[in-house]
Amino acid sequence: MHRYKLSYSSYEELELRCTGCSNTEESRGEWCLGEFASKWKNMNCGSYDDGMNTGNWIHNRNGISTSLAQMFVEVRNRSDINKPNSSPQTRVLPVVRVPSNCPRNISLLTFDPDGDEVKCRYASSSSECDTCTPPSVFSLSSSCTLSFSPTDSSSEGPYAVQLMMDDFPRETITLTQNDGSISQRNTNSALSKIPVQFVFKVDPAAPSCTEGEYLPRFLSPTPEHGAQIFIDVHQTLEIPIRAEATQSVITELLFSGPANVVKNSSGSGHFTLRWTPSGDENDESHPICFVVQAKSVSDLK
């Protein structure tokens, strides 16, 4: 099963461009997000490229207009696990926001079902991006961490982010195709190349950068970043999420996850995500990511 997310500036635009949409999440009219899934047969047939031109980016500070998302998928049988390779997985919200005066290290969610090493880089070739200008406001490490340093108001605004997430075997392996032909990959050879694209938005300065004051902070029993939870098919997963901000009001929870995730709120800063996997989702890993948003009391008056 191949699953991917597409985000657009409105639900109507998403519906016009795509079919089979499920689990659309919206952020107060700013964007909507839909999950799409397709089944592939004869998965051990080799490796292949797949991609799409999904239209135009929103206006951004690094001058990228046309969106191009190209992936390379390796599905030949691996000698180390004796089954087809699986691509690395991640989730990210369509818009990642930071105040212009607050330093931030944002670790993207990375997971590889085969235990491979996952690395990130900027999209760089004509097959990976139409215009390949990286954002100037943060640095990207190969371990998939975005590092943002405080800047001034002249840098505020949205930036288009075009990343590639690659998986590397931890030892030299042999890949075998259905016809018996083989090839090798070592620890420096990427197996799959998956596009990850979103908007990085630099917002006006916050009164304080201390988490838990104007900027929300998560509280127990919210799962830690990278936590893994195991459940059975048709069993309901409940993820409790608690957050506080003493000088502002938490207004909403935004999340990206598999289809049919249900969000509930029981008061400011108290949320629950519930999801019951179906038989089609058995033996798979399904990342979920979320953030909470807050507004200062003065902004709500």
Image (tube, rainbow, N blue to C red):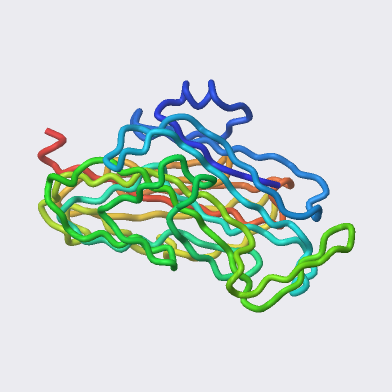
Q: Residue at x 54, y 45 (%)?
A: 127
Task: Decide: is 224 above or below 51.
Answer: below
Query: Residue 108: x and y, percent?
Result: 42, 59
Query: Residue 94: x and y, percent?
Result: 41, 42
Task: Decide: is 58 above or below 125.
Answer: above
Q: How many marks?
A: 0
Query: Residue 41: x and y, percent?
Result: 81, 45
Q: Residue at x 36, y 43 (%)?
A: 160
Q: Residue at x 47, y 61 (%)?
A: 120
Q: Residue at x 45, y 59 (%)?
A: 121
Q: Quadrant of the C terminus?
A: top left
Left/right of residue 255 with respect to residue 215 in the rendered view: right
- Judged from this view, the residue extending furthest toward the bottom is 171
Task: Decide: is 173 above or below 75.
Answer: below
- Judged from this view, the residue extending furthest toward the front is 126
Task: Decide: is 10 above or below 199.
Answer: above
Query: Residue 35: x and y, percent?
Result: 56, 38
